[in-house]
Amino acid sequence: MKKWIFFSGIIIFFIGIIFFHQKIVSLIVLPQYIAWASDTEAAGLKIGEPLDEKQLVIANEIGIKKPEKVRLVYVDEVPFPYENVVLKVVGEALGFIGEDIINNAQVFGYSIYIRKGYQLTTPNLAHELVHVLQIERSSLAQVVTQHFADLVKYGYESSPLEVEAFKAEENYRHR
């Protein structure tokens, strides 16, 4: 009898996830990720290096209001909250992390984390600076929320936030 109740509970739990996944993501997953991302930005602001003169020009051209706040943080691996089981599962499902997935750069507010060994070319920097601009226009929480929804709806390549960043990358291709 106990096993039946246990397995029934698990089945109901998974049915609930299937039918209410958007609510679960917005009420449980996103707040956890946003809190972690905010902490990651704060850490990056303390340890990162400011943009150099050439990079500041690009940030100004892209439209960032406070380019002097942007910090580049070079790391062995772009951070992800692997210790949070829920976020790890969602990250794997969305293709953020997993076997053979290498994240070269990611923006957390004004902190841009860059994997050591990744060529931060002018086009690549422009791409990441557009993400800084997107966050600056609204907030880290709003961009994270939109990005999660867009990834599910459009996929990475067609996500509106990525499309905007890819356009900047293309515009700076020959600089």
Image (spheres, rainbow, N blue to C red):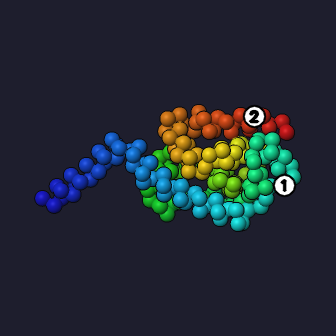
> Residue flagged by tag 1: what amino acid is it?
Asp
Give percent across and percent down for residue 52. 84, 55
Question: Which residue is pictured at 42% across the width and 54% down the height?
Answer: 28
Foreground residue among 35 and 127: 35
Q: Mark 1 points at which residue?
A: 52
Graded by Cα atoms within 10 Å as few (under 14), some (14 to 19) or many (20 or more), the crowding at tag 1 reads few
Q: Position of residue 51 (x, y in %)?
A: 80, 55
Label 2 belongs to which residue? Answer: 170
Q: Position of residue 7 (x, y in %)?
A: 22, 54
Q: Is residue 166 left or right of residue 155?
A: right
Q: Position of residue 89 (x, y in %)?
A: 45, 53
> Residue 49 falls in which quadrant of the image?
bottom right
Is label 1 in contact with label 2 (beta carbons under 8 Å)?
no
Q: Is residue 84 above or below residue 141?
A: below
Quarter holding the C terminus? Answer: top right
Gap in Å between the C-alphas at discs 1 and 2?
Answer: 21 Å
Q: Circle 1 — which element?
A: loop
Nearer the camera: disc 1 or disc 2: 1
What label does residue 32 carry, if any?
A: none
Residue 59, placed above or below residue 82: above
**Quadrant assignment, res 127:** top right
